[in-house]
Image: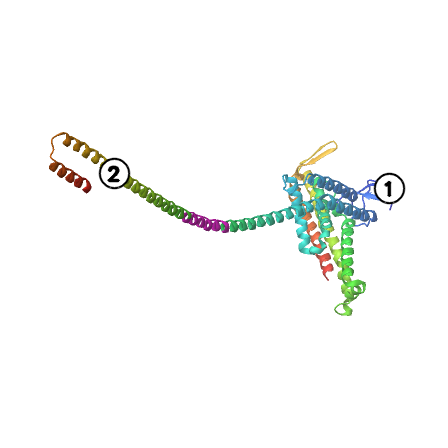
Amino acid sequence: MDDIGAGPKVVFEIGSIVITETVVMGWLIVAVVTLLCLWLTRGLKKVPDSKRQVVAEMFVKFVNDMVKKNMGEKLMGYSPYIGALLISAVLGALISMVGLRSMTADINVTAAWALLTFVLITFHKIKANGFVGYLKSFAQPVAFILPLNLISELATPASMAFRLFGNVAGGMVITGLLYGALGTASEALHLHFAFGQWAFSALQVGIPAVLSIYFDLFSGCIQAYIFSMLTMVNVGAAAEE
Amino acid sequence: MILAAGDVTDFLSINLTTIIASWLNLLILFLVLKHFLFDKVNKVLEDRKNEVAETYKRADEAEENAKKLEDDYRERLSGAKEESAQIIQAATKKAQQRSDEIIAEAKTEAKGITENARAEIEREKKIAVNKIKDDITDIAFSAAQAVIEKDLTSEDNEKLIAEFIDSVGEA
């Protein structure tokens, strides 16, 4: 019960640098994705003869089409970035299904990604309008609206960060609460069996899986998609201005 | 608060290390995806697209070529028909000419042969007539000798000779 609503654990530290579970999950995802990429793209042919190539092409086409539709042909260079964002967010949420802590249930991760999106938006706005034009755009269409424009500009990354974090962390908390409740209920109904160190609550089998399908699988994928989509739409819109 | 391994951080704590690590992880993942997935797969997709376009182009070209060849052959075929008709006509004309020549030649030759034959017959006839005349003379002499050996009056003799000569002259 103690770890419900707690932040990620510290795995190790180097001097004053603290490495938490979140970062280790990130490394794990990078390692897995790297191996997966190397495996998927082994022996690519013009006429595909392996399912691996079909899967790799499907993923690349999916991301390419999305980027083309939302950001335009000019910003096709962003598709690997969007793909990285999508994979990180999906795997970061789904990693909880194998009992590890979700990477995206850490506000630092989602904030870092949202900040990057904010930087890209600002970069493209300045590139499209010039620095003076960018500053002037905050006083458009009338000058007194400036504070509102500033808030909306900052609200974009903030809302993105908290949306992703809140969904995954909320799911984690609810799943933890449910586990606790089912454990307590099992003890009350004498369905809790303890064999020394190893304990087993009968009600904890099966029932959490149903909620897990929603909170981890569905919500995780949807929120990952939304985060990538918002990044594409906002950066694409900034570049078009 | 100094954290040690195994400690649990606060739920909403800001951790600069995690933020920087997240950026680095995302950057590495971006580079990995770019080099090991997107660049490779995009190249294959591009190659395939180019190949398909190339194939279509080649097929179009081949079709056009075939059409051109067909037209060419059709034209040549009609030319050949005309030419063959011409050749046949020329050959017919030549054959006709030749046959006319041959017939004319044959006619001339036949005429020559007939004339020769007629001249020969005339000559033979003359020879025969002369020979007969000689023979008659011989016979007349023999007859005359025979008459002379018998008793023949001079009167009768004269008469016989005159008659004989007359009859021979008639022949």
Near-viewer residue (B124 or A34):
B124
Judged from the image, the secondary structure of the residue bearing numbered disc 2 is: helix
Tell me the amino acid under the disc marked 2: Asn
Task: State the residue at coordinates (66%, 49%).
Answer: A62
Q: Which mark is residue B130?
A: 2
Indicate the position of residue A204 as horizontal and vertical percent values: 67, 39
Q: Chain of mark 2?
A: B
For label 1, the SS is strand
Furthest residue in direction right, as rendered: A15
Quarter the N terminus of chain A occupies? top right
Residue A14 numbered mark, or none: 1
Residue drawn at x 56%, y 49% is B65
Q: Is residue A230 magenta?
A: no
Q: Horizontal and vertical percent for residue B171?
A: 19, 41
Q: How is the image coloured?
A: rainbow
Q: Which residue is nearer to you in this view: A10 or B124?
A: B124
Q: Magenta segment range?
A: B75-93
Residue A178 horizontal/vertical position (percent): 69, 44
Camera-side residue: A175 or B26? Answer: B26
The chief SS type of the magenta part is helix
Query: In this rendering, is residue B137 above or below A222?
Result: above
Tell me, for residue B154, which label it has, or none.
none
Kind of residue indicated by mark 1: Ile
